[in-house]
Amino acid sequence: MLFAVLATTCLLAHAADTAHTKTVAIASANAAATEAGLETLRKGGNAVDAAIAVATSLSVVQPEASGLGGGFLALIHNAATGKDTFIDAREMAPQAVSTADYVNKDGSPNRDTSLNGPLAAGIPGSPAGLAYMAKKYGKLPLKVSLAPAIRLADEGFHPTRSLAASIKHRADVLGRYPASSAKFMPGGNPAVSTDLFRDPDQAQTLKTIAEKGAPGFYTGIVAEEMVRAVKAAGGTWTMADLASYRAHERTPITVDYAGYKVITAPPPSSGGVAVAEILNILRGIDLKNMDQVHRIHYLVEAMRRAFRDHNEYLGDPDFVSMPMDMLLSPFYADGLRQSILPERATSSSWLPAAHAPEPGMHTTHFSIIDKDGNMVSMTCTVNTTLGSAFVAGKSGVLLNNEMDDFALVAGKPNAFGLIGGSANAPVGGKRMLSSMTPSFVIGKDRLAVIGSPGGSTIITQVLEGILAFIDGKNAGEITAQKRIHHQYLPDRIDVESGSLPADVLGKLKAMGYEINDRESWGNMNVVVWDKSTNVKSAASDPRSHDGLGKVESIH
């Protein structure tokens, strides 16, 4: 069971820049996290400092989707230098990883060990990535940027309905582990929205990081407690695994489309490569002047081909040689475009084979533009709802279950239905492939900071958001628009319930498409800056009741 919450539209505040005021814009999945970012900006921080405040606050108030025990991918734009850079804080496999731990006796994937408990957890990247960003690109010390999260954890907050539902859903697994039960089910009952939820153990870990930086998490008493708890519950982490973790700075992927520059995530994200490949295919197609049926047809066929390549080629760039020149080449895209039949669906089985349950909705994304034009697009994750459901002892850190994002059993789908081969096979120290796709879209007079959670659907959500922005839609329209998704396997179009007229569905079926009607998915957060009017706008996905997109004047 997955939780994609339908609710009322989030509060939006719009304010125009003038000669006397400058505005900042933040859109995140939780109102308290957005306010934490704004608080940090008011204290003189920049977009990076605000991102650190938002990310750590989400670790406290939205643990079902992200946290210190997970990882993130982030794009940063430095307004003063014009430089764009990518921070890779993806989790990595412990050195003692063994595929035997994730396979049943009959050779099938063991979903319990890959999704639940300490064997499911990769070495977290978030604390290292946040400390790296603060030191190299921030203006404030960590003790200032982490202060809102520490206050939330110490003083407490009321769980959102989404968090309460996630705890209830994972109660059986949480109940296996004393620290998990103590954190999420005090008194033996799942926390509910009326409870005042305090997290003193995570507060202490945050204070240690604020004082000591990344070493406060990866060495010393916090690391010792996490390793002790993991090993006691059957995991394989060592102190050396934690001490060896480093965040990496990488070069973003850039692709031009329809007069806009799209800046997006490189591997170990698969998302940026897929988005670039899809846009290169669509570059030779006049989508704007097509009827709805054929627009969907060409979008889906481009998605199908990009996801096939995703499954075949992509992995951790520190371990795998990938044909990036080919995948990002417009000439390669020309050939893929020529293989699309204008009036008929391509069966995925007709394409060369690639080494593919419903896509998950957890992970979180936020978008920030500060008063000076610095930008951050950041997607954070613990993988599926509440990650591994394993809290590492008195550290208070809820661990991820990102090991399932490896191709643990070749040719078998992971929790998101994605199939991988040797490029994404688990190796000690290797980072698992991700769908996270934080992106910027830059035009002559308008720009957008965009991203979303949603497992494998992240890629298509971001793609459709980019196209909507290029078509002139504003932040609220981008987050609210209905979505479609195709990922090569399973060979079907997922269609957001009620989004397409019956005649359009009928024509797509006549072309050979299988249609899967689904409830809403994703939780997109977008910031748009219209430089022609000097107005920033921020919007959070109306499908979620927890988010807040806000614009505020900062003097």
Image: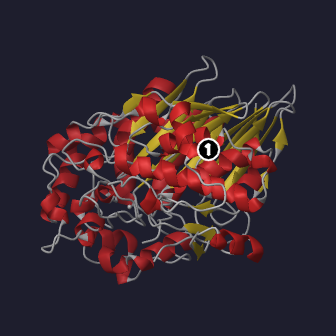
The amino acid type of the residue labelled 1 equals Ser
Q: Which of 336 and 555 is in front in this view?
A: 336
Whether residue 405 is situated above or below residue 171 in the rendered picture: above
Q: Nearer the viewer, residue 162 or 307?
A: 307
Dividing the picture into quadrants, the one containing residue 403 is bottom left
x, y percentage for residue 50? Answer: 57, 39
Whether residue 22 can be seen here = yes
Mark 1, residue position: 367
Q: Which of 363 and 47 is in front in this view?
A: 363
In the rendered structure, the answer to whether residue 267 lies left or right of residue 111 reads: right
Whether residue 224 is situated above or below residue 440 in the rendered picture: below
Q: Which residue is drawn at 72% across and 62% down?
A: 293
- The quadrant of the rendering that contains the C terminus is top right
In the rendered structure, the answer to whether residue 459 lies left or right of residue 244 reads: right
How was the colour assigned to the protein in this rendering?
Answer: secondary structure
Mark 1: secondary structure: strand
x, y percentage for residue 301? Answer: 57, 54
x, y percentage for residue 490? Answer: 45, 67
- The quadrant of the rendering that contains the N terminus is bottom left
Whether residue 182 is situated above or below residue 282 in the rendered picture: below
Q: Residue at x 34, y 49 (%)?
A: 205
Q: Which of 177 and 407 is in front in this view?
A: 407
Q: Dot 1, how many residues are within 10 Å of its Cα: few (below 14), some (14-19), or many (20+)?
A: many
Dividing the picture into quadrants, the one containing residue 136 is top left
